[in-house]
Image (cartoon, rainbow, N blue to C red):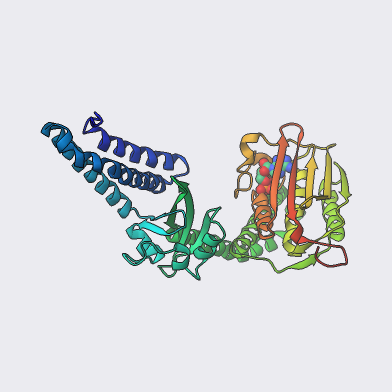
Amino acid sequence: MTPPATSAWKLPALLAGALFGGALLGWLAGGHVAAGAALVAVAEVVFLLTRGGHRTPLIMRAPGAASALQHDRFMTRSRRTAASLRDVRNVAAQLPDAVVLLDRQQHIRWFNHAAETLLGLRRPDDRGASLQQRLAGSELSHWLRDGAREPLIDAAAPGQADSQLNVSMLSFGDHEQLLLAHDVTPLNRLEQIRRDFVANVSHELRTPLTVIHGYLELLDPDDVPELAPVLGEMRAQSKRMGQIVEDLLTLSRLETQHEVVDERVPMAALLATVRKEAEALSQGRHRIVLESTAEADLLGSPKDLHSALSNLVSNAVRYTPTGGHITIRWERVPDGAVYSVSDTGFGIPATHLARLTERFYRVSSSRSRDSGGTGLGLSIVKHVLNLHQAQLQIDSTPGAGSTFACRFGSARLLTPGGSEE
Ligand code: ADP
């Protein structure tokens, strides 16, 4: 049999190209350069192992069946394949992310050095062992048992105390799987420093601002009429700063909280309050309608839910010109209930929608400031909803209006005056 006429340099070049391509794809898919390279590296290991297996008999048969020259070529090529295999394995072994190659029964076929450090795997003992059993008792083991469908975020690292991992599972080949674990401890530490900094600064600013605001309130513009406009502006700005500080402190609290104290939140009363607040803010400039058909109370934090739901109404009033309509709805859907606020206001271009819940993100800074906004309202709404396992959905058409909808699951619903559904 004639050996394939592939040039000797092609295979290593192909493997290197694929590795680079994997890294590039990983980068394009959200900056996961190491993950992309790892996936390709492991696929290459599998490819070379499988390829080597097919080639061996050919090489063994070569001397008898073909010329010595052909045999030499075979041997050269096989040495190069082995060298490529070694290179690819070395790359995968040195990756900073933990990489574990699993067979269809989730038994460990291969793992790199980072998997030893981060997951606590040991060689040679753990080769062939069930990964789930090997990590028994850890968050990761429960995740594997449940099918590992969604990536696992901030899981405790089984092999390294006080470290957190983002873990994902990728399928390839013949029902084989690749577990990738990325150490997010340094990122989390930075995030914590940022949170502490914002919380501390806000806290430190609170007292001096209260003092300044207090003195400004004491000054009577009638005593110094020539300074009346300046005084008015100073009061407005100190009030705005006070509101920003309060909103930042609320956000800091919500960010560090992982769950809410569950209390009954009577929705009839809350909706009536929210509507009254909207009317006070609107001062008769809008037509405000309340449609409540859900007949359900919520289970959660009354204070936080009030803050989130009234934020949406306040936005609707502030971003709807005089004469516009605002409709507040509380209605049932098959898997829960939806609170929504629709307006006939300015609307939001589609390009801004994905970023609206970021802190200080505004479609129009001047419009936000003029209407007394801090740029933090929707961030607060998103955090409150996350804590209640609810989702925010935004639909908007520029020039026609917007609908902000909060979707609560059935587990958060209570029959008014009764029990959980
Ligand atoms: P702000 O205090 O600026 O209102 P938010 O976080 O509440 O901050 O909202 C972020 C931005 O989203 C606003 O600045 C505004 O541009 C836009 N926005 C929010 N609600 C509406 C709405 N109902 N209609 C139009 N734009 C809105």
Quadrant into which the N terminus falls: top left
Residue 40 in the image: x percent, y percent?
37, 43
Q: Residue at x 63, y 62 (%)?
A: 254
Is residue 83 shown left or right of residue 181?
A: left
Residue 238 in the image: x percent, y percent?
66, 55
**Residue with the most extreme left position:** 68
Is residue 346 shown left or right of residue 182?
A: right
Camera-nearest residue between 343 and 72: 72
Q: Please say whether residue 221 is visible from this viewpoint.
A: no
Is residue 44 shown left or right of residue 238?
A: left
Camera-nearest residue between 72 and 351: 72
Ligand 1, by image quadrant, is top right
Camera-nearest residue between 11 and 305: 11
Q: Please say whether residue 63 is visible from this viewpoint.
A: yes
Q: Residue at x 48, y 52 (%)?
A: 169
Q: Quadrant of residue 209?
A: bottom right
Quadrant into which the C terminus falls: bottom right
| 138 to 103, vertically: above or below | below
Residue 101 in the image: x percent, y percent?
40, 54
Q: Quadrant of residue 182?
A: bottom left
Camera-nearest residue between 381 and 12: 12
| 400 to 112, vertically: above or below | above
Is residue 112 shown left or right of residue 175?
A: left
Q: Residue at x 75, y 42 (%)?
A: 403
Residue 41 in the image: x percent, y percent?
34, 46
